[in-house]
Structures are given as structure tokens and as C-alpha cells.
Image (cartoon, grey):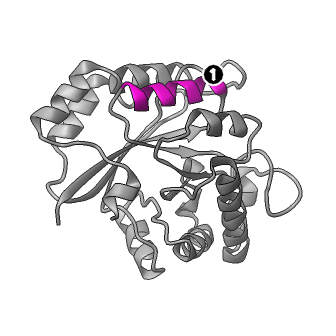
Amino acid sequence: MPRALIINADDLGYEPEVTRGIIEAMREGVVSSTTFMVNGPHSAAAAAAAKGLPVGLHLNLARWAKLSAKGEWDEAQAAALDAGGAAKETHAQLERFQKLMGRPPTHVDVHKHLHRHAAVLEGVAKAAAQHRLPVRSIDKAMRGALRKLKAATNDHFIGDAVAGGPAYWSLEQLERSLEQLPKSGVIELMCHPGHAPRLIESGYGAQREVELATFTSPSARAWLERIEVVPVSWEAAFT
């Protein structure tokens, strides 16, 4: 199996400064994909900014408006969802994505990896499979579960972001990870570049600026050229 590297920036639409940084990382740097939060107050502006770029759905069950019911999401409610409820909200957010972007998403992933809950994973996978969309897996167990549910997924996953901790993607970390990339399969490198948010209090704010500097650095492009890897979108990786 040939090797495909996707460098995906999470959180498009989270906050205007975050969105601005993601767009920079894609247009001026090496980020090849992003995922979009469609149920927030800044979603419409983000959709306009991202026209023409490879964009997936960043399914958001952690905050802001429910699109399949009344009220707002929080993580406790997400953890208690059954598969039917998760599928219903996934369909609703996919529909909102289509309305905002004028096209379907390239794939689906989940804010804060809330599809680590078995029922959420089942619902997300079933909805995504109906739309023929791949879904992010973050480990071997999730990968196997998604494939049993007939949802395509990546073969490898690299990345993290800890609120209050240091930026995950320093230049040094990126170089180490690129040197150790698997030799085959679809590899997703998850990142969180952006400018520090001004309208939302965040435990991962200044860290986004470090990641933005990493993924727009000439060194990042040079390392990719040296190992002869060109980052691609999810759509390109699965066609």
C-alpha cells in the first residue's frame, strides 16, 4: 500500500483568529486539510474564508447548539448519547456543512475525540458510511471498530493537544515525526495551528501560534521535500 500523509488542522470555525491562522497554514504552509465546526457563532464566516480548500466536518458534541434537538451540547451529554442520537446529530451537522460550504465534506472527525465512546463511534460511523465519508481513527481499537462498521479510516494517527500544556508541534517534534513516518498506509498528522483566540478563553491559545509557526516554517517544507512526501487531502488519500 502506498504512503499518503494528511496534515489536518482541527477547529476551523472555532474562533475568528483561529480560523485566520488555519487558512494561513494551508495557503502559506504545509497543512493539507482542515475540519470545520459548523454549529458555532463563527461558522458562516469560516465557511466563506475556506472556499476552495479541502475541508472535512469537525463534528462538535462538546459545545454550542445541537442541530438535531433543542439546547446546547456539553461533553457529559455527548458521553451519554446512544448510537441513534449520535447518528442523528452527525446527519444534521453534515447537512449544515453542505449548506454552509455548498459541497460535502472530505471526511469526518470529532472534536475532543468524543467518538472514543462506543455508542458515539457507532452512530458517527453509520452516518458517515451512508455519506461514503471516511472517519478519523486515533488508535488501533477505533480503527478496527470503524472498519467493522463499514467506515473507511486512516491507517495511522499522530498528534495531540493538551490544554495548559506546551504546544505539541514544535519544529523539533515535527522533524522527529517526519523522520519516523510509517512507510505505507494513510497517515493523519493532527495539528492545531492558529492565532491566539481573542473572543474565547482557551487553554490552547498561545500554543496555536507555535504550531502555526511550525507548519509555515521553510524548514517544514524542506523536511517534507527531503523525505519525498507531499501532504494530501483526505479526499485524495481515499481515491
Left or right for 122, reference 234: right
The image shows residue 31, relative to residue 115, as above or below, that is above
Q: Secondary structure at mark 1?
A: loop
Left or right for 72, reference 175: right
Q: Is residue 126 magenta?
A: no
Range shown magenta: 16-28
Which residue is drawn at the image coordinates 30% and 62% (left, top)? 155
Residue 199's spot in the image, x, y percent?
A: 72, 22
Residue 104 lies in what quarter of the image? Answer: bottom right
Image quarter of the N terminus: bottom left
Which residue is drawn at the image coordinates 74% and 41% (left, top)? 40
Residue furthest out toward the right: 70
Which residue is drawn at the image coordinates 23% and 42% (left, top)? 230
Left or right for 1, reference 10: left
The amino acid marked with disc number 1 is Pro
Q: Nearer the viewer, residue 170 or 214?
A: 214
Q: Nearer the viewer, residue 60 or 234?
A: 234
Residue indicated by mark 1: 197
The image shows residue 14, relative to residue 126, as above or below, that is above
Which residue is drawn at the image coordinates 41% and 57% (left, top)? 138
